[in-house]
């Protein structure tokens, strides 16, 4: 596309130059100027368009020839490896036959590594792994496919599962209370109360009204509060069950 635009622009300039010469020049100089203009345009076209295109074609042909040569060389190397694999298998199993299972065997033998083959005429074996390293060494190992028996997963014993209150505390209680305690302590508070509905309250004045600070969803039932208090104490808080609430101080 860019080449077409360049040629089109050059033709436009050539046309303008020819028209200018025909309009402005009279006499014997007109024909030499026209010939010179066309000659300059032709040299420019040859140098900037034809020669680069020819060089590109030549480079492409050289690449194609090199790729063809490399592919031919890879096929020759593949045949050599095939004979070595056959000799390795027939040394132990004279009736052995085989086929490559890799997508591109020629590329495999060039790059090296381990590739799988399907074998026939070898009792108890269906596959073999062929390894070719960079030094040219080749090894062949027979592979026997054995199905793995199904194993039933046994559920964890009840005593290995964490209680509900401990799961709740680790999932949300510890983080929520930790953030709130840090905030309250920074403002001079030293206690809070946990209610049965999960509400968190503080009492700014000793004889004043409680002020709700937040709500814990899924708060454990009352019969689990003693265990919950133990978890709070493990985190450095003092927790006491008092009837319908848990008093927490720090």
Image: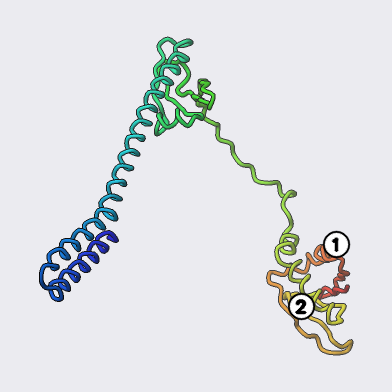
Q: Is residue 89 left or right of residue 246?
A: left
The percent coordinates of residue 204 (x first, y second) are: 84, 86
Which residue is at the far left?
Answer: 27
Rounded to the nearest angstrom, the CA distance separating label 2 from label 1 is 20 Å
Q: Is residue 170 left or right of residue 128?
A: right
Which residue is at the far front?
Answer: 28
The percent coordinates of residue 145 (x first, y second) are: 50, 26
- The quarter of the picture where residue 150 lies is top right
Q: Quadrant of the N terminus?
A: bottom left
- Between residue 134 and residue 221, name the one nearer to us: 134
Residue visible at 73% across and 74% down? 198
Q: Is residue 108 left or right of residue 55?
A: right
Residue visible at 47% across and 32% down? 111
The residue pinned by badge 1 equals 234
The percent coordinates of residue 240 (x first, y second) are: 87, 71
Which residue is at the far bottom?
Answer: 208
- Between residue 214 and residue 87, name the one nearer to us: 87
Number of other residues with Cα within 10 Å of mark 2, as a class: few under 14, some 14 to 19, many 20 or more = many
Q: Which mark is residue 74?
A: none
- The quarter of the picture where residue 18 lies is bottom left
The residue pinned by badge 2 equals 200
The answer to which of marks 2 and 1 sits earlier in the sequence is 2
């Amino acid at each position: 596309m860019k080449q077409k635009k360049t040629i089109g622009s050059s033709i436009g300039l050539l046309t303008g130059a020819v028209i200018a010469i025909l309009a402005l020049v009279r006499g014997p100089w007109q024909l030499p100027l026209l010939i010179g203009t066309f000659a300059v345009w032709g040299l420019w076209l040859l140098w900037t368009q034809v020669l680069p295109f020819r060089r590109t074609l030549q480079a492409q042909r050289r690449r194609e020839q090199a790729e063809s040569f490399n592919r031919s060389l890879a096929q020759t190397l593949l045949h050599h490896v095939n004979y070595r694999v056959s000799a390795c298998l027939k040394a132990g199993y004279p009736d052995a036959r085989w086929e490559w299972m890799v997508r591109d065997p020629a590329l495999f033998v060039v790059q090296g590594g381990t590739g799988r083959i399907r074998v026939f005429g070898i009792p108890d074996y269906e596959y073999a792994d062929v390894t070719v390293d960079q030094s040219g060494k080749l090894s062949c190992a027979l592979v026997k496919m054995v199905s793995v028996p199904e194993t039933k997963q046994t559920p964890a014993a009840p005593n290995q599962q964490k209680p509900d209150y401990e799961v709740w505390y680790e999932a949300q209680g510890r983080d929520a209370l930790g953030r709130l305690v840090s905030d309250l302590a920074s403002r001079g508070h030293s206690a809070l109360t946990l209610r049965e509905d999960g509400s968190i309250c503080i009492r700014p004045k000793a004889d004043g009204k409680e002020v709700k600070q937040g709500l814990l969803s899924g708060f454990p039932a009352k019969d689990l509060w003693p265990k919950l208090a133990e978890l709070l104490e493990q985190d450095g808080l003092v927790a006491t069950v008092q009837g319908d609430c848990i008093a927490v101080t720090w």
